[in-house]
Image (spheres, rainbow, N blue to C red):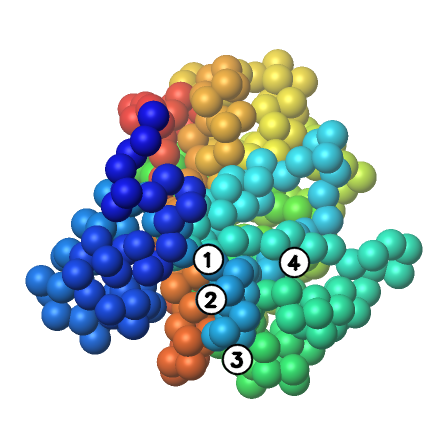
Amino acid sequence: MSEGPHRPRRGATTIEDVARAAGVSRQTVSNALNAPHRVRPETLARVTAAIRELGYQPDQSARSLRSGARRTLGYLAPVDDPLDPNPLMAGFLEALVDAAGAEGQRVLLFRPAPPAGDPTAAIDELVAARQVDGLVLADVLARDARIAHVARLGVPFVSFGRTGPGEPQHWVDIANEAAMAAVVRHLAALGHRRVGYLGAAEELPWMAARRAGFLAEAHRLGLSAVPVFPAAPVSPAALPGLPAPAAGPSAVAAVRALLRGPDRPTAVAAGSDLAALDVYEAVRAEGLAVGLGGVAVTGFHDTPLCRHLHPALTSVRLPLRAIAGALVGRLLDQVRGEAAPVAGLELATELVVRGSSGGPAAGG
């Protein structure tokens, strides 16, 4: 059935068709698409209405060739096990794709080629191919070679995780120390005076910050605090009067040994939700209960497993959508030639209280 001589078939609409329908020039339509601030509001409204009515889809590939922009952001994805993926970073990727899409951008995932796995070589290959406008990095370590490399290249980039002194401060991160201090205050408000902390076998920067926040707040509140199973000791000068961390053959064994001691803690905070599973196992192996009437347990990340444990796990929720949105915004500012950020952005977390800590459950 014919749609009439002046109504082009959807999917085949050209910029000239939009111009005729709106009663403007082709250049005006182009300005409405690429520089709407140059077009009078009433004219912009007519062009927008015509685009919507005719179903016009701009040719993004042609626009990219003219401007040099790829409208694609590269994400150097952390190495993971597809059969046991990191639920936190999977959630971050979802948030990143959504945030990029809201700005008309795509996300291109890439990783170093095995067996060498050199991330700088992977970055060089992507940059040389001009496939992306900028890079998103995550899991940033101290003196991270990736940060130094992209800074030397002059490539627009942002990082989920803090860069070091003297490096570009293009990062977005959570307030790890403040988040763990909130956990300690929650436990103290429930009456706990002896608290333990289960860290990680490897001393990652964010895990070190969580442990430091836990111990400092426990010290400030006058609690008896014992960290278990972190890889590196806490400096006595930094934390006067606190015991040195214990190490053990496994997280479960370390927590069990702590629970057998004469001054066993009545609460154990974990630096991640997965570490909290080890605390659950240790508590039950010692014939104790998790939560009310037993040992309070908290986690960190608020991954989906928290809601499915019995009792459900109190955990620190990360604002993944806010993190992703801030990263995309900061990266696109650089891509567009605006000033690069001179300071990192720290975002607050939320403590989601559930039955494992023995307090009033807030759900979530």
State the image coordinates of residue 360 (x, y, percent, origin top left). Answer: 29, 24
Q: Earlier in the sequence, mark 2 or mark 4?
A: 2
Front residue of 255 and 178 = 178
Give the amino acid type for the residue marked by disc 1 in the picture: Asp
68 relative to 131 in the view: left or right: left
In primary-sequence order, the first of circles 1 and 4 is 1
Q: Which residue is mark 1?
A: 59
Q: Which residue is mark 2?
A: 63
Q: CA distance from mark 2 to mark 3?
A: 30 Å
Q: Marks 2 and 4, Cα distance to the nearest angstrom?
A: 26 Å
Residue 314 occupies quadrant: top left
Identify the secondary structure beneath mark 1. Answer: loop
Describe residue 354's horizontal placement relative to residue 113 as left or right.
left
Q: CA–CA distance between discs 3 and 1?
A: 35 Å
From the viewer's perspective, is the residue at label 4 or at label 3 nearer? 4
Front-lying residue, 287 or 39: 39
Task: Measure the C-alpha gap from mark 1 to mark 2.
Answer: 6 Å
Percent across and percent down for residue 259 are: 61, 29
How far apart are the two marked residues, 4 and 3, measured between alpha carbons? 18 Å
